[in-house]
């Protein structure tokens, strides 16, 4: 008995890295999986079928069921085709993992419009493009569903040289919180992940050169959380964001300080009063 017997899952960007591990782990637990990957280079250039085909083959060799999809998550038509592949091949969709991603790292001072647009298109618009048809399908079917989106500490905490990527990833976290609220009445649960793993996307980044990372950031470490969230073990959970990587899993949250409320003068603060009462307004360091 698998935790996901009878379920159908889509994983975008599942031809390598973290997404491949998600697809293999979901299939091991009995889900039938659509393995989506555009098959391009690390920066999003080009496309091909080999990456998705290889993971489908791996799943089938291990006794699971999978179907490939080569569509681009960054277009509305691509998103619709990805969801349609699940419906055509396996009759329905229960679990969507939005994972596809690219990098075009540059400091803001050097960033071109194209580097901004393409990163926002794949990550943020891509999450919208695949989620909307999946959400509509789940809503119409009336049996709930699970949508797991991929954010990043780069967006939630900030990272040097990634204003485009960080903006898109913080947007995905906000999208997920709104989606979770809208999905509640239909039993559609939504989560965001901030994973850390050594993949072709990250192997060159400075923080991944650190010795404390070596050998500890296996992309396989992310998938158990995805399986848990997709399964009935997490049926009471929704609207959560998790850091996950190197053996650590930790919820992340936006926090608001108790703050300070002025009641005199109609609540209108003077800038010098704000300066004087900063310790009441700010969160402790
Ligand atoms: P990866 O490059 O190994 O995997 C990303 C996959 O997405 C690739 O196989 C690529 O072909 C595919 N892809 C890219 N554009 C696509 C498109 N338009 N349509 C369909 N597929 C497309 O990188 P990864 O590290 O496994 O990243 C997976 C996700 O995790 C990404 O969203 C990434 O931003 C996020 N993430 C990774 C880390 C990390 O430490 N590796 C940290 C934070 C967030």
Image (spheres, rainbow, N blue to C red):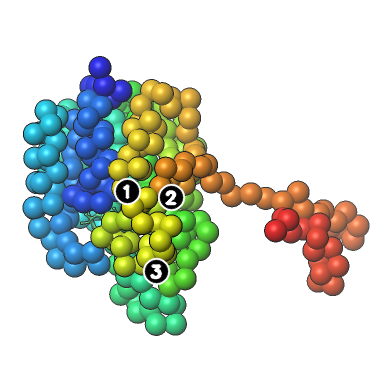
Residue 110, picture quadrant: bottom left
Q: Quadrant of the N terminus?
A: top left
Does residue 125 appear anywhere in the picture? Answer: no
State left or right for residue 183 relative to residue 270.
Answer: left
The residue located at (9%, 46%) in the rendering is: 53
Judging by the rendered image, the residue that carries numbered circle 3 is 206
Q: Is residue 255 above or below residue 157?
A: above
Q: Quadrant of the C terminus?
A: bottom right
Dot 3: within a 10 Å radius of its alpha carbon, few (fewer than 14), some, or many (20 or more) residues? few
State left or right for residue 94 relative to residue 253.
Answer: left
Judging by the rendered image, the residue that carries numbered circle 2 is 194
Q: Are marks 2 and 1 in contact (CB under 8 Å)?
A: no
Judging by the rendered image, the residue that carries numbered circle 1 is 218
The CA span between labels 3 and 1 is 17 Å
Q: Nearer the viewer, residue 144 or 57?
A: 57
State left or right for residue 230 relative to residue 6.
Answer: right
The CA span between labels 2 and 1 is 14 Å
Q: Please tell me which of labels 3 and 1 falls first in the chain.
A: 3
Dot 2: within a 10 Å radius of its alpha carbon, few (fewer than 14), some, or many (20 or more) residues? many
The residue located at (50%, 63%) in the rendering is: 158
Q: Are marks 3 and 2 in contact (CB under 8 Å)?
A: no
Query: Residue 91 at x, y = what percent?
Result: 17, 28
Q: Please tell me which of labels 2 and 1 falls first in the chain.
A: 2
* Ligand 1 quadrant in view: bottom left
Q: Please tell me which of labels 3 and 2 falls first in the chain.
A: 2
The residue located at (21%, 51%) in the rendering is: 16
Q: Nearer the viewer, residue 55 or 168?
A: 55
Does residue 108 appear anywhere in the picture? Answer: yes
Q: Is residue 280 above or below residue 218?
A: below
The residue located at (25%, 42%) in the rendering is: 21
Query: Residue 173 at x, y = what percent?
Result: 46, 50
Ligand 1 neighbours mark 2 (CB distance < 8 Å):
yes
């Amino acid at each position: 008995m698998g935790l996901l017997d009878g379920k159908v899952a889509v994983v975008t960007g599942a031809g390598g890295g973290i997404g491949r591990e998600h697809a293999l782990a979901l299939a091991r637990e009995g889900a039938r999986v659509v393995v989506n990957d555009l098959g391009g280079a690390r920066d999003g250039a080009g496309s091909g079928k080999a990456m998705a085909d290889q993971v489908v083959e791996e799943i089938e060799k291990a006794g699971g069921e999978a179907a490939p999809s080569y569509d681009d998550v960054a277009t509305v038509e691509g998103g619709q085709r990805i969801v349609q592949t699940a419906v055509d091949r396996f009759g329905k969709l229960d679990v969507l993992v939005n994972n596809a991603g690219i990098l075009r790292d540059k400091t803001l001072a050097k960033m071109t419009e194209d580097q901004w647009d393409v990163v926002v298109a794949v990550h943020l618009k891509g999450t919208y493009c695949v989620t909307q048809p999946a959400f509509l399908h789940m809503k119409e079917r009336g049996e709930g569903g699970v949508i797991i989106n991929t954010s990043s500490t780069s967006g939630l905490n900030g990272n040097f040289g990634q204003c485009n990527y960080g903006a898109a990833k913080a947007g995905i976290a906000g999208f997920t919180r709104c989606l979770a609220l809208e999905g509640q009445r239909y039993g559609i649960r939504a989560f965001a992940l901030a994973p850390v793993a050594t993949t072709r996307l990250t192997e060159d980044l400075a923080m991944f050169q650190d010795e404390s990372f070596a050998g500890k950031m296996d992309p396989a470490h992310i998938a158990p959380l995805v399986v848990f969230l997709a399964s009935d073990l997490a049926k009471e959970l929704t609207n959560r964001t998790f850091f996950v990587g190197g053996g650590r899993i930790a919820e992340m949250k936006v926090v608001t300080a108790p703050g300070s409320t002025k009641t005199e003068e109609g609540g209108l603060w003077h800038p010098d009063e704000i300066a004087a009462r900063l310790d009441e307004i700010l969160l402790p360091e």
